[in-house]
Amino acid sequence: TDTRSYISSLVFLRPCVQRMLYLSVLVAFAACNAPPVPLDDILIEKTFVPEQCVRAVKVGDYVRYHYNGMFPDGKKFDSSYDRGSTYNVFVGKKQLIQGMDKALVGMCINERRLVKIPPHLAYGKQGYGDIIPPDSILHFDVLLLDVWNPEDGVQINTYHTPSTCSRKVEVSDYVRYHYNGTLLDGTLFDSSHTRMRTYDTYVGIGWLIAGMDQGLLGMCVGERRIITMPPSLGYGENGDGSDIPGQASLVFDVILLDLHNPRDGITVTNQKVPESCTRKSIAGDFVRYHYNGSLLDGTFFDSSYSRNRTYDTYVGRGYVIAGMDEGLIGVCVGERRTITIPPHLAYGEEGTGTKIPGSAVLVFDVHIIDFHNPSDNTQITVTYKPETCDKQAKKGDFVKYHYNASLMDGTDIDSTHNYGKTYDIVLGANQVVPGMEDGLMNMCVGEKRHVVIPPHLGYGERGVTDEVPGSAVLVFDIELIDMEEGLPEGYMFIWNDDVSPDLFSEMDKNDDKQVEPSEFTDYILRQVNDGKGRLAPGFDPYRIIDNMFSNQDRNGDGKITEAEFKLKADEAAAHDEL
């Protein structure tokens, strides 16, 4: 606007108002046409400040930052972004123009500043070649990405500590851990989680960068910590050649999952031993046990309970992993224990391929159900014996007894008391398992016994479906209720009196010189009923008589002739007949 024409228009106003407006216009005109006021110092505008500032730049720190350099009119003269690399330098050591040295002090990681620097704190009257003219004011848009100091060491911030910590990482330990690796500005450069595989390594022997070697020491399994390290303890001046730039501070968010030492053996903890333990397992025993298997961080990988079946194996013979072979020696039936097994005594560096990773420590919570040795015999303990014991059970006797049956861990199997009747067998006739035969021999009526039967004298490896597990030791509490004396071995029928010399004719009722099956059966039953003879007790009498008849019927024609008829005493070869 033309100032004079504007002033001339003021004539229509009152004189006092004219004078006031005239003076204000002159002041404004003088201000617009005056030369710029020179900057005495840098001007800083904080365009972005992070919520948290864990560390601010100090004199002597080394920083990595990006910048755009511009003149006041907005014309760019330089940019670290265009070069694709940060500007890396010590602060306060005259490696920068004086204004930038001052501007960087106090900055936080990820803070952004617009810095205006006067010429005397920049390139002054000389400028900088053809790029920066003399006496130029410079504007820098700065983003701080990293800061560290040559005096820095590893910084550790533990943000989760497990409730129990029985062991901490020491030099030469082998560890398995997950991590997220970032730069100080939060840029992710690596993660074991994305690979879905732990990082496995020895600690303190140079297999890791120095900062991680230090940062892992003292950790507990399950602990989480932030490990921050300067480049001197990371990848140094050159970085890793790809994702980690040179002179970069590194931040690792670590969770420790596993820990062992090559010198470790198994450890047994949380033992709960029953009050009564008359026997402990030894090498060569066959053990049945339940277990829950987990990794050291608690990750579950297997359980016999989920299969509703015990794990059955010989111990000390290499049938299971070496650590379990050792951990099952010296156990009692009913005992519970936790067995921790280092990988070199378990599945080694390879693991199992699916559930158990390589170099994993295994933890087994074990409950011993029973064990035996293939050389074991039936164990018999007499718990009650009557004062009078004239007759003792022997092979061939017909015995009646009650029993309560259970497994070694106390699990009930069966009881005759549930049925309100005795269990009746002929000893030596293979009507019960061999161990029960042993347990009943030489018992008196009224006697009580505690009988422990190993599986090879019980139901063997197969057991009884839904009743007795395979390879189970059986426990019977038995009481002999009644006993009928059997016949001499090899006999199914004996005479109580002298044998009639006319035995054949007495059987041959119709006097046709041959004995029919009905005649034979009627005659034998009559002798038994009259007390003149005895059939073997405990068997079906008709089956015995049929067998006797078949033995006399030499030619198998269904009839016995007098020529075929012989007493057992007259036989050259023994078999069951008269």
Image: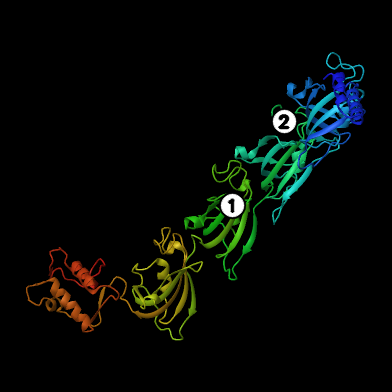
Q: Which of 160 and 111 is in front in this view?
A: 111
Is disc 1 surrounded by few (<14), some (14 to 19) or many (20+) residues within 10 Å?
many
Q: Is mark 1 on a helix, strand or loop?
A: strand
Residue at the image position 86 percent from the left and 14 percent from the top: 129
Side of 147 where 287 appears, left or right: left
> Which amino acid is tagged 1?
Ser
- Foreground disc of the pair 1, 2: 2
Residue at the image position 63 percent from the left and 50 percent from the top: 297
Q: Looking at the figure, which quarter contains the N terminus?
A: top right
Write down the residue under mark 2: 244
Per the rendering, the mark at residue 159 is none
Is disc 2 surrounded by few (<14), some (14 to 19) or many (20+) residues within 10 Å?
many
Q: Residue 8, how many percent across, how many down?
A: 87, 21
Quadrant in the rendering for residue 65:
top right
Side of 104 where 510 appears, left or right: left
Residue at the image position 15 percent from the left and 74 percent from the top: 520
Quadrant in the rendering for residue 567:
bottom left
Per the rendering, the mark at residue 294 is 1
Q: Residue 506, how many percent across, how many down?
A: 13, 79
Does any portion of residue 498 appear in the rendered image? Answer: no
Dot placed on the residue nearer the N-terminal end, 1 or 2: 2
- Name above or below for residue 396 compared with residue 76: below
